[in-house]
Amino acid sequence: MTTHDFHPSRRTVLSGSAALAVAGSGLLGAIPGTAAAAEKTATRQDPTKGTKPMLQGSHVTTKDGVQIYVKQWGPQTGQPVVFSHGWPLTGDAFEDQMMFLAQHGYRTIAHDRRGHGRSSQPGFGNDLDHYADDLAAVTEALDLKNAVHVGHSTGGGEVARYIGRHGVSRVAKAALIGAIPPIMVKTDWNPDGVPMEVFDGIRAGVKADRSQFFKDLALPFYGFNRPGAKVSQGAVDSFWMQGMMGGLLAEYECVKAFSETDQREDLKKMIVPTLVLHGDDDQIVPIATSAKAAVKLLPKGTLKVVAGAPHGLCTTHKDIVNEELLAFLRA
C-alpha cells in the first residue's frame, strides 16, 4: 500500500558518513485542526500565490510556493515520459525505467513529491489534490505536450487525480503500475478492501520508529520475505534511504491520502489509452481491489499481470516493466 529542495544542512546530512538522511510524516496530523490551520496560514502569507509555476535549476516552484525537485534524462526533443513515484520513495525509484527509455529516445522526467526526497516540506497539502496540482505545475513549467504519465503505487493515484482535475490536453497515454486506484481501504462499496487497522498500523510504525519500519517494510515490498527469495541488501538500503529523505509529517499524512481517497471518478476521466501493470504477488496493494477493479472503470484500460511480481516490480522485474512500457509507448 505500500507508497527537492535541499538546504545546505540537509545536503550535509545526506553526504556525510551516515549518508542516508531524513524523512517522515507527522505528529501534527493527529491534532485536530492543526494541518488546516497551517495550510491557511501558509497560503495567506505566501507571496507567490497565484503566480505561474517556474522552473529554477532543478526545481519547479508551484503556485503555493512549494519547490518540487525535477530531474530529466534523454533528448529534449523526445516524447516526454513523466514518472510519479510511490510512498515513501522519491523519483529515484524509477531510475531503471528512466535510463532505459532515455536510451530509446524518450525524454524522461521524474519529480519528488512535496514532503518527499529533495522537494520542499511545507507542512500542508499532503493529499492527492495537491499532489496532482504539483504534477500539473511541473508539466506547465516544462511545457510538456503529448506526454505519457507513469505512476507507481501512490504515484498511480497521483496520475489519475492529475487527469481527473486537469484533463488530458497535455496527455497522450498513462500507465498505472502497482497503483492504488480506485481505493485501498475497505468501504461499503469496496468490501474486499484492506481494513483500516492495517493503515493505522502503518501510521503507528512510522510515528514510533520510521527508520526501522522502512527497513522492515522493504522486505514484503520487494517480495524478499518469500521462501527462497534472493534478497538484495542494496535494494533494501535504497528503499530505506529514499524513505528517510522525506519528512515525517508528509509521510505520516500521505498514508491517509493513499489509502482513503476515492478515485472512481478519476479513472472514468482517463480517456487516453492506459496500461495497468500489476504483480500477482503484490503484498502491499492487493491486485483484486486495485488493478482488476480499476481496469473496469477505465475507458481505454488494458490490464497486464506480471506473474510472481511483488509491489516493487519496477526494481525486481525491471526488464519486464521496461519492455512493457516501451511496447506501450510504441503502440
Image (tube, helix red, strand yellow):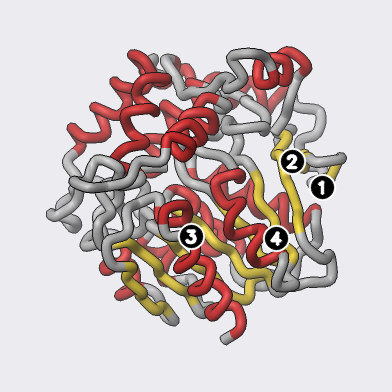
Marks 3 and 1, the one that precedes in the sequence: 1
Which residue in the protein does label 3 denote?
Answer: 318
Disc on the earlier residue, 2 or 3 = 2
Q: Is residue 223 left or right of residue 29?
A: left
> Which of pointers 2 and 4 indicates the residue nearer the eye?
4
| Quarter of the image with the C terminus in it | bottom right
**Other residues around mark 3 within 10 Å, as few (<14) / some (14–19) / many (≥20):** some
Numbered badge on residue 63: 2
| Above-or-below relation of 242 to 169 | above
Circles 1 and 2: CB distance less than 8 Å? Answer: yes
The secondary element bearing badge 2 is classed as loop
- What is the spatial separation of the Cα atoms under label 2 and label 3, in whole angstroms? 35 Å
Q: Which residue is mark 4?
A: 108
Q: Secondary structure at mark 4?
A: strand
Q: Which residue is mark 1?
A: 52
- Residues 190 and 49: in front is 190
Q: Which residue is located at x 32 percent, y 61 percent? A: 279
Q: Within the image, what quadrant is residue 102 found in?
A: bottom right
N-terminal-most mark, 1 or 4: 1
Identify the amino acid type marked 2: Lys
The CA distance from mark 3 to mark 1 is 36 Å
Instruction: Kindly state the secondary structure of the residue where label 3 is placed.
Output: helix
Label 1 crowd (10 A; few <14 / some 14-19 / many >=20): some
* Closer to us: 245 or 236: 236
Vertical relation: 7 (above or below) 312: above
